[in-house]
Amino acid sequence: MSFARFLTYENRLAKIIVAPGGKRASAAVNDAEAGLLAMAGACLVEIDRLIATLTEGAGTLGRPVGRNDPLYVAAREIAGLGGLCKRPQLGEAAHSLCVLIDHFEAAANWRPEAISVHVSTIQLLRGMPVSEDNAVQQQLVESLRDMVKRLSDEDCASNRP
């Protein structure tokens, strides 16, 4: 007979918030934001390193890439780091590149020029000033999404009997 064992972990933040004289939720949020701000410099250095990996990978696109390729891994990591560095559009553009690579892998239809456009846009977004409501940056991301959708629709249409 087997037994189920349930593990519970102590949520220190919850304890601090409900304890008398404990930390207020707004103070905890402010502390978290200050911690993220302190990490922003290191985060941007890592994003720059990953963009260099993307640029290098985009230069050798004579072959298909998949989820284990350094190009895909770099894009996935940038997608995760973009929000931490207050650059959500950069993360969204990198995510769009991951979606594009996933689509190409599934459709077995490789288009390196579309990947090059994504990499160039990611480089452009990294060089732009930080602004959460920048319409130009949002338009660039929307254009990438539209391209992925259009390519996907074209591949679906060409595979129909």
Image (cartoon, rainbow, N blue to C red):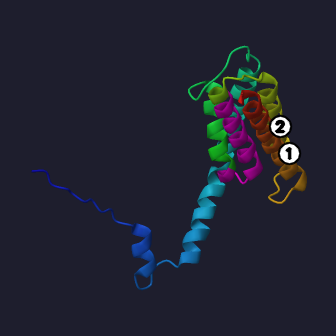
User: Which residue in the protein does label 1 denote?
Assistant: 140
Amino acid type at circle 2 is Thr
Mark closer to the chain start, 1 or 2: 2
Q: Residue at x 71, y 46 (%)?
A: 91
- The main secondary structure of the magenta stretch is helix
Figure quadrant of residue 70:
top right
Tell me the element at label 2.
helix
Residue 87 in sight from this viewpoint: no
Q: Residue at x 62, y 46 (%)?
A: 80
Magenta stretch, residue numbers: 83-104
Tell me the element at label 1.
helix
Residue 132: x %, y % from top left: 80, 58
Label 1 close to label 2 by CB (< 8 Å) = yes
Task: Choose between 40 and 63: the one closer to the eye.
Answer: 63
Figure quadrant of residue 128:
top right
Q: Residue at x 76, y 28 (%)?
A: 158
Residue 97: x %, y % from top left: 71, 36
User: Which residue in the protein does label 2 denote?
Assistant: 121
Q: Is residue 130 above or below residue 63?
A: below
Q: Residues within 10 Å of mark 1 (few under 14, many from 20)?
A: some
Amino acid type at circle 1 is Leu
Task: Give the residue at the far right of this rendering.
Answer: 136
Q: Residues under labels 1 and 2: Cα distance? A: 7 Å
**Residue 76 bears which disc, if any?**
none
